[in-house]
Image (tube, rainbow, N blue to C red):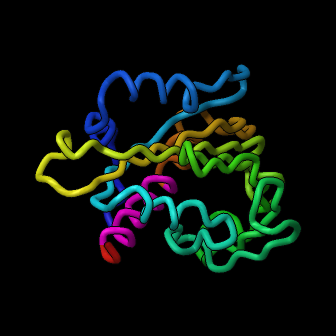
Amino acid sequence: MNCNGSENGIQSVNKASTDSMLRLYHSPTLYPNQCTSRVVQLVHAPLPLVWSIVRRFDYPQAYKQFVKTCIIRDGDGGVGTIRELLVVTGMPANTSVERLDRLDDDAHLMVFTIIGGDHQLLNYRSTTTLHEVAPEEAEGGGRKTVVVESYVVDVPSGSSKEDTVLFADTIIKCNLKWLARVAETIR
């Protein structure tokens, strides 16, 4: 699967709401040893369907193809839930332990933090928002959703900001492309 992504989808949402959303949720404060980026994916499926897939903190493998299994270690899937992900063979890690920090069904917002695992993504915090494209703005018609995922992470010792962003962006782009494929198949 080609995992190249872009911010083209964000142009499908009106400029005022886009700017407000990016400022509010996707403009984190950084420490000198941290980096950030955001990935945008246009999904040709209605927002309620896409959100029903994304909001499942207990079942990320529905669209995150690098996740083999997810085990809930504490909680019921709501805020404060801790999950352990077992990652597919070939990745530079075997596990990731993550905590759900925020889940807002009205704002279509999910925030989680990586709190453990055998990888180098220290102090990783992900923010994902979904935005419905107005029918009059949806090129080609149909209901569409823009998904924006941003993150903040420490730059590992011996690595550069550029390498860290390249790694994280590649994983997120693949995940969001797979999300689009899954949602567009079941719509």
- Of residues 26 and 118, the one drawn nearer to the viewer in this rendering: 26
Looking at the rendering, the stretch of residues picked out in magenta corresponds to 171-184
**Quarter-of-image position of residue 107:** top right
- Does the magenta segment cover residue 72? no
- Does the magenta segment cover residue 180? yes
Q: In the image, is 78 to the left or to the right of 46? A: right
**Residue at left 53%, top 67%?**
64
**Residue at left 48%, top 28%?**
22
**Quarter-of-image position of residue 15:** top left
The N terminus: image quadrant:
bottom left
Q: How many labels does the image show?
A: 0
Residue 148 % position (x, y)? 46, 43
**Residue at left 48%, top 29%?**
21
**Residue at left 35%, top 51%?**
145
Instruction: State the predominant SS element of the stretch in magenta.
Output: helix
Q: In the image, is 103 to the left or to the right of 10? A: right
Q: In the image, is 131 to the left or to the right of 60? A: left
Is 160 above or below relative to 42? above
Residue 155 % position (x, y)? 69, 36
**Quarter-of-image position of residue 49:** bottom left
- Of residues 150 and 139, the one drawn nearer to the viewer in this rendering: 139
- Of residues 168 and 137, the one drawn nearer to the viewer in this rendering: 137
Q: In the image, is 28 to the left or to the right of 100? A: left
